[in-house]
Amino acid sequence: MSKVPLLFAALAFAVSAPAFAQQPQPAPQPTAAQPSETPREGSVNDRRGDQQNRIANGVQSGQLTAGETRNLESREANVNHEIRADRSANGGKLTPQERQQVNRQQNNLSRSIYQDKHNANQAHFGNNQVGQRRENQQDRIAQGIRSGQMTAGEAARTEGREQNINRSVAADRAANGGKLTQQERQNINQRQNSTSRQIYRQKHNGARAPK
């Protein structure tokens, strides 16, 4: 076989190779946008509503005790105060840095809600008149939290009173073989009446949980 055709073929390939190498490569396709580390303005309000619903569910199911609810709602009220102050100072909006700070606080609160709802503590009311009233008032508080008729601060104050009543009931029963005396039942009933009126006032005073 002649070496001439092979020589021409090699020269042709050598000339064309740079041309192929210089062909423009297709531009990389943009990837889907990644979620921003800075939450959107609306997400602050959405998370507040979601966390109040989770607290309300825990109150109604008995997974959250009055003391746990008081602590959670006190923290929620503090976050709400901070949001209101920041928005007031910035024309009704939160800066990106403020949104990040609130998001961190809401993350911490979310973890606390989960931990409190899944620990060994449970609300125990007992199958008696005092217990039934305590359970009924917890249901009313849960409904007020869920509907927004009770603010976080109002719920915290009311649950603080409920916690004190629960402690009194436990102490009185421990001192009397598991029972309440007639005088102790009357005292608890008066305190429950007072708390019941407070729940009603808070749910009808026009104050609403922020959305």
Image (cartoon, rainbow, N blue to C red):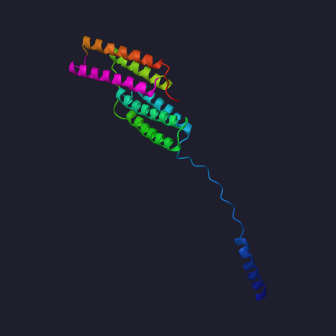
Compared with 56, 181 (above or below) is: above
Q: Is residue 98 above or below residue 70?
A: below
Q: Nearer the viewer, residue 2 or 190?
A: 190
Looking at the image, residue 145 lies above or below residue 41:
above
Residue 67 found in image quarter: top left
Identify which residue is drawn at 48% across, 41% down: 103
> Any magenta on residue 173?
yes
In magenta, the rendered stretch is: 150-179
* Residue 102 in magenta stretch: no
Residue 17 image point, x, y percent: 72, 75
Q: Looking at the image, which residue is at 35% across and 16% down?
A: 192
Expressed as whole percent of the image width and height from the top left, the position of residue 6 reads 75, 84
Residue 176: quadrant of the picture: top left
Image position, residue 92 (x, y; %)? 55, 35
- Residue 142 in percent (x, y) is at 44, 24
Q: Is residue 24 left or right of residue 93?
A: right
Q: Is residue 174 left or right of residue 86?
A: left
Q: Quadrant of the N terminus?
A: bottom right
